Amino acid sequence: MPNMSLKKNEMPSQPADVRNKNFSEVALGYSEEQAVDEAQRCLHCKHKPCVGGCPVQIDIPAFIERVAARDFEGAYRIISESSSLPAVCGRVCPQETQCEAKCVRGIKGEPVAIGRLERFVADYHNSHAANETVRPVSNGHKVAVIGSGPSGLTCAGDLAKKGYEVTVFEALHTAGGVLVYGIPEFRLPKVIVQKEIEGLKALGVKVETNMVIGKVLSVDDLFDMGFEAVFIGSGAGLPRFMNIPGENAKGVYSANEFLTRVNLMKSFREDCDTPIMHAQNVAVVGGGNVAMDAARCAKRLGAKNVYIVYRRSEKELPARAEEVEHAKEEGIIFKLLNNPVKILTDERDFVSGIECVEMTLGEPDESGRRRPVEKEGSNFVLDVDCVIMAIGTSPNPLIKSTTKGLETEKWGGIIVNEHGKTSREGVYAGGDAVTGAATVILAMGAGKTAAYAIDESLKNK
Ligand code: FAD
Ligand code: SF4
């Protein structure tokens, strides 16, 4: 008999007023008992609607059935047939708009907690399984991967398993892409990403850090070095700004810079020499996951008041519902239907406030969301000493500008066909570098697609 409880098993987590002062993981994960109880809520639907909602098509009912039978390693084997980063995806995937949105238990009550179960299974495996990676025999083909985010890591892993000699070239000094420099420790502990990268190295993947392709080496150089195919997974790390007065003042950060200082450079630690502003009052402009992460980091750095300034209403917030909920619990103040028009500065050019205007929502725009319209004469000032811009990013033009024959969209996205092939022979691309800022699972899916296409083109050569 399935467990017919209308509610998911709750996720144990640190209390809000404790966690908003530390960088340890917020959610603590299910116990074995909670996982088995939750797995028993699955109805094992014949048509598996949940699988249709998963971008990498994990056989969800099959792995949940293994959890219910306490065969956690069996569950892991099923997940890892389709996903190469389950401990990451179980933590950061927007399940509420993907698999869980399609779960029939969600029609009357809450869906099965698929993401929490995925996380449980991956964590169980990571803490119980012996490292038995067998290095595949080389097939003699060499492939270069640019960027070590989820798209690059997935592409590298899939090819290495087939015997390719893969080298990942990463611009930063640490591999992992947004998983290490963007998403904070309290949502995704870095040991998890590190473990995935160690797993790839055990398969024979070489990771070369501090290698900015387009500066140190070009794509042409990579072909000259004997690589037969190149995958570009360089992400979308170029921050956008609003072009409002005062944006160059001291105390204005892009969210990327702010989060890199906190997550990658560990500026929150006393023994770290990377400087960061410990502001008292912070405005974060934007409403996505990046904005929530920046706001929650600013709070943990000791800010008294942290404001999310977003020009639409709560309904349109692009961040995951869970992140918004967590941010509110931690004391982040939401200034919705507000838009900044000017950053105010003092005589030393430090931020002294942010002037905003109130908005209302008009007719839907080309994105389908209602267009925000300024309310005339509604300007007001928020007293802040730091402003973090989290209004989006685009792909860095460096690789495009140094690679002959690589076609891109006007906004910078690399143009690919359905197999991840670019306009340049032998060059493939995927992830945020192609789509613009998107999600971990979509980047992984793109890495997989390209790995398959590279294998198809090289295996018979
Ligand atoms: P990235 O992860 O951006 O990796 C690209 C890598 O390429 C980087 O390491 C970069 O240094 C490197 N690189 C760039 N240029 C070069 C070069 N010229 N030479 C060599 N290396 C280069 N998604 C979710 O699904 N859930 C979330 O909760 C979530 N939260 C997020 C929070 C933040 C703060 C951010 C910024 C993003 C978040 N995302 C989330 C989005 C998700 O992380 C990205 O969609 C995903 O990481 C994209 O993967 P990628 O492999 O395309 O690129
Ligand atoms: Fe189980 Fe929900 Fe998938 Fe049905 S839709 S198989 S109940 S997880």
Image (spheres, rainbow, N blue to C red):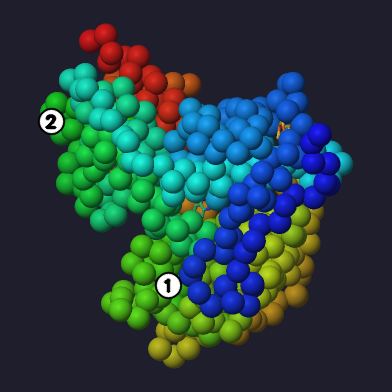
Q: Secondary structure at mark 2?
A: loop
- Say which of 414 and 293 sits in front: 293
Residue 379: % across, % down: 70, 76
- Find residue 225 and name its label: 2
Left or right: 235 in relation to 215: right
Q: Position of residue 445 (x, y in %)?
A: 48, 32
**Quarter that holds the N terminus:** top right
The amino acid pointed to by label 2 is Met
Q: Nearer the viewer, residue 159 or 367?
A: 159
Answer above or below: position of 55 versus 455.
Answer: below
Residue ID at (40%, 64%): 263
**Can residue 405 be seen by looking at this rendering?**
no
Looking at the image, tell me whether mark 1 or mark 2 is earlier in sequence order. 2
Kindly identify which residue carries mark 1. Answer: 248
Q: Is mark 1 within 8 Å of ligand 1?
A: no
The structure residue drawn at horizontal position 39% and vertical position 21%, both measured from the top left corner, is 452
User: How far is the residue under mark 1 from the one under mark 2?
Assistant: 42 Å
Q: Position of residue 94 (x, y in %)?
A: 62, 46
User: Could you tell me which secondary element the residue under label 1 belongs to?
Assistant: loop
Does 374 appear above or below 445? below
